[in-house]
Amino acid sequence: MKKLLQISLGVVTSIGGFLETGNIATASQAGAAYQFTPLWAIVLGTVCVIFLVEMSGRFAIASHYTIADGIRARFGANIFLLTLAIAFVVNLLVLAAEIGGVSLALQFLTGVKFQWWALPVTCAVWLLLWRGTFGLIENGISSLGLIALSFVVAVFVMGPPWDQVVKGMVPTMPSEDPLHYSFIVVGILGALISPYLFYFYSSGAIEDKWDKSYFGANRAIAIIGMSFGAIITAAIMVLAAMIYPARGIEDIEGYEQIAMILTPAFGKWGFYLFAASLGITCLGAVLEVGLAQAYLVAQGFGWNWSEDAKPRDNPAFCLVYTASLLIAMIPIAVGIDPLKLTIFSMAITAISLPFGVVPFLILMNDPTYVGEHRNGWIGNAAVIFIVAMAFVLSIVATPLEIFGG
């Protein structure tokens, strides 16, 4: 019964961690510009993230190490510092985008510009991290993200052409503007395969004291939970494909346009459902990214770390998420467009993937850490594919940002 509850909570909270401003923005832009054809990128990204999340949990259970611990112990200080520097910067960009998402949701609900919400949102997130527990953040705040199921309900209310939806799951390349299409695909993959998710997940397994009886639960959470979040992301793309081209909108230029995505299905209440979905899922993501940042630094330098501990017992851990939140708040407070920041941060996330995935592949095949639970040929084939894809993304993301973004 306890394992079943853990799986249920893991599936539910996957919405708060998996679905966030990056998924919402990239899926909406893709649907508006290319209708159903980029759905295959969501399928591909979801399969990749399922493998990586399952391995993150399996590594933590088998080795009693987090991923950051393992990289430092296996590869030494120099490799770890390189990984840390890249992940730290990428996490700051993602954190800023998520703060922007919460601030925009509050702007939609109150009419007050998002810039003015940056500091209150940051303070509220900091207070939750300072006073909250891992269980509150993982199962409490993130569970509120169930409101995002309104996107799935809206798809069935609207009744999409299912034959085109299925056809969109087969990889294709349009003849017109392939650079922009490729940039959108890179952004989708960057939003789905975010490295912070693996650091957070492996740390959560240690926080929750998962033992070897949790291998099955870990696998179920990875498969069902990530798929659950991906279905909502796909629903957003399907809605965008049905709504925006019919209104002559092929290029989403701001969240104000995305905010109307639920109104055809739910009328004026759709606007408030979208604002609530955006705000709650981004709040869950801000908390998880902030914690992932603190976990990464504290574990790498051997400091005390635990969200369940009192701040006085791990002051350096708390200092990291405090400083990260303050730095990430600045772009939103000065008025940088959250949508442009989100799209840019997702492309940068794609560039950073090799630096996190390659060491992870080696760790998952090292019997010193995982023993008999190291990767089989299927797992290795999947990760090698992800590594190859990550290298391609890291090479093409920058020119695509320039010429197709």
Image (cartoon, rainbow, N blue to C red):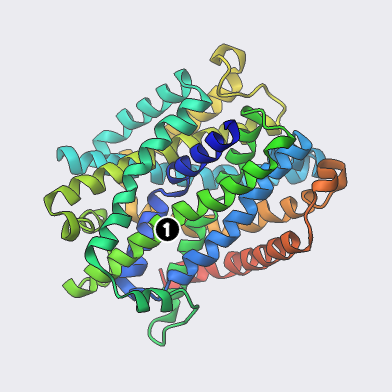
Quarter assignment of residue 310: top right
Q: Is residue 45 above or below residue 318?
A: below
Q: Quadrant of the C terminus?
A: bottom left
Q: Is residue 323 above or below residue 178?
A: above
Image-based side of 267 in relation to 159, left or right: left
What residue would you read off at disc 1? 231
Residue 166 % position (x, y): 42, 75
Q: Nearer the viewer, residue 332 or 226?
A: 226
Q: How many marks on residues?
A: 1
Q: Is residue 79 above or below residue 206?
A: below
Q: Which residue lies most toward the left here?
A: 268
Q: Nearer the viewer, residue 271 or 226?
A: 226
Give the residue at x 71% y 36%. Answer: 213
Name the residue type under label 1: Ile
Dot 1 lies on which element?
A: helix
Q: Is residue 81 visible?
A: no
